[in-house]
Image (spheres, rainbow, N blue to C red):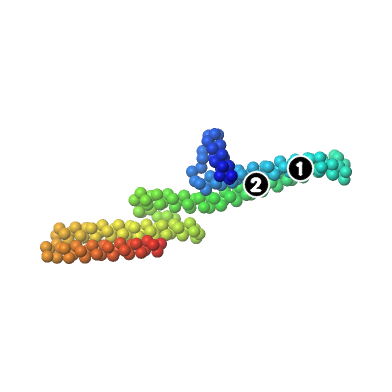
């Protein structure tokens, strides 16, 4: 049911030509804020109907004067509306702050990993926070450093192998080439082990 409500809600964004947020977390945040707002609005309408109903007016009219009962009902309704409005505002602010605290570091991590996957290994992610996102950024930086080291090592080994095959002595060329390949294989194994430790 919630899934269908979400679909309807985000389709209405397109109907009113509103820009749909890119992030899934941002979309969920907007949905839940609006959903909570609708729930509070429904509660306010129900409370209004309940307090304006004949039973409440009848009971209050028998206890106090009709004019006083109407002013009492109006005062209660105003306080309920203010309370519900403040509660909705507080929940919205807490959700926005929570999402902001998660979204900004997460967006930086996504941008950094996109740059890394495009081949920009000079990118480092800021690991400012001491939470799970900071730890994730630190591990991605370690992985990136290991990849840089492996790439430089592999290029060096390829150059060494090329020089050995081109400039080496005929008798020792093959043995030196096999030794270089073995060193490269050991380095790749070490990288694999350190990759799984991250």
Q: Which residue sits furthest front?
A: 1
Residue 30 visible in rendering: no
Q: Which residue is mark 2?
A: 88
Q: Quadrant of residue 45?
A: top right
Left or right: 143 with respect to 30?
left
Q: Is residue 195 above or below residue 112?
A: below
- State the residue at coordinates (41%, 57%): 140
Q: CA distance from mark 1 to mark 2?
A: 21 Å
* Label 1 element class: helix
Residue 98 appears in the picture as rendered:
yes
From the top left corner, tell me how far across and down residue 63 is, in percent.
Answer: 87, 45
| Circle number at residue 12 | none
Query: What residue is at 37 percent from the left and 61 percent from the top?
Result: 195
Q: Residue at x 42, y 59 (%)?
A: 139
Pick the quarter of the image with the C terminus. bottom left
- Residue 120: give x, y in percent of width and height: 35, 51
| Of the pair 45 and 95, the residue shown nearer to us | 45
On the image, the x and y values in percent for residue 169 come to 12, 63
Residue 73, horizontal then vertical, whole percent: 79, 42
Above or below, 98 relative to 34: below
Which tag, 1 or 2, sits closer to the chain's start?
Answer: 1
Within the image, what quadrant is residue 15 found in? top right
Mark 2, other Cα within 10 Å: few <14 / some 14–19 / many ≥20: many
Element carrying mark 2: helix
Point out the image quarter for the N terminus: top right
Relative to 45, 6 lies left or right: left
Residue that appears at 47% across and 52% down: 106
Farthest left residue in view? 170
Mark 1 and mark 2 residues within 8 Å of each other at the beta carbon:
no
Disc 1 target residue = 50
For the residue pair 94 and 189, the one nearer the viewer reads as: 189
């Amino acid at each position: 049911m919630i899934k269908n409500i979400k679909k309807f809600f985000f389709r209405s964004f397109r109907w009113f030509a509103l820009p749909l947020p890119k992030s899934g977390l941002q979309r969920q945040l907007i949905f839940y804020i609006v959903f909570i707002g609708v729930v509070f609005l429904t509660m306010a309408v129900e409370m209004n109907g309940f307090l304006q109903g004949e039973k409440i007016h009848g009971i209050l009219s028998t206890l106090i004067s009709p004019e006083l009962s109407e002013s009492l009902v109006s005062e209660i309704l105003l306080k309920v509306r203010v309370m519900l409005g403040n509660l909705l505002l507080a929940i919205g602010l807490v959700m926005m702050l929570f999402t902001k605290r998660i979204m900004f570091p997460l967006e930086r991590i996504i941008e950094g990993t996109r740059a890394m996957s495009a081949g920009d290994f000079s990118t480092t992610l800021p690991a400012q926070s001491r939470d799970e996102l900071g730890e994730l950024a630190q591990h991605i930086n370690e992985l990136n450093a290991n990849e840089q080291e492996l790439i430089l090592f592999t290029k060096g080994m390829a150059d060494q192998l090329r020089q050995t095959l081109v400039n080496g002595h005929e008798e020792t060329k093959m043995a030196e080439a096999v030794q270089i390949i073995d060193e490269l294989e050991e380095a790749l194994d070490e990288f694999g082990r350190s990759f799984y430790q991250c």
